[in-house]
Structure formats: structure tokens, C-alpha cells
Image (cartoon, rainbow, N blue to C red):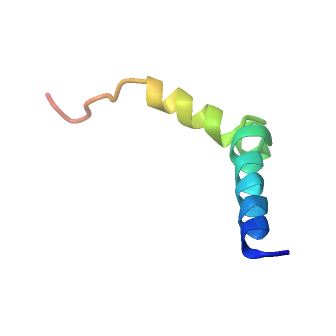
Amino acid sequence: MNFHQAQRLVEESIALYNHKRPHLALAMQTPESIYNQQKSRPLSIVGTS
């Protein structure tokens, strides 16, 4: 295995981990789906009275 093959394998593994593989700690959702849910929610302002 050369450098480029290893690099491609690592990139594919990271993509699988973040985009396809559900995680038990995330209620069987992918990190990508959690990120997209949080990104679409507006931030709330706390402590301004």
C-alpha cells in the first residue's frame, strides 16, 4: 500500500464514521445529522433581562 492508497482508505473511513454509521451515544444518529440539526437551530440569548 502506498501513501495515496492509505490516504484514500483513511478518508473513506472518516466519511463512513461521520456520514453513514449511526452512533449509540447519538441516539443512533450520525454525527452529520446531529451537526445539521444544531446548525439549523437559531441560537438563544441567555442572561439578558
> In this view, which residue lies farthest toward the right?
1
**Residue 29 image position (x, y, % from top left):** 73, 34
Please identify the quarter of the rendering in which residue 24 is found: top right
Quarter of the figure that contains the C terminus: top left
* Residue beneath the point at 43% across and 24% down: 41
Position of residue 26 measured from the top left corner of the image (x, y, whole percent)? 70, 41
> Where does the N terminus fall, quadrant-wise?
bottom right
Tell me if residue 26 comes above or below residue 7 in the rendering.
above
Left or right: residue 41 compared with residue 30: left
Determine whether, in the image, residue 31 is placed left or right of residue 44: right
Outermost residue toward the left in this view: 49
Determine the image quadrant of residue 23. Answer: top right
Residue appearing at x 70%, y 57% in the figure: 11
Determine the residue positioned at 64% across, 32% down.
33
Give above or below for 1 relative to 37.
below
Q: Residue 14's image quarter?
A: bottom right
Q: Nearer the viewer, residue 38 or 25?
A: 38
* Residue at x-position 31% and y-position 28%: 44
Q: Give percent across and percent down for residue 22.
A: 79, 40
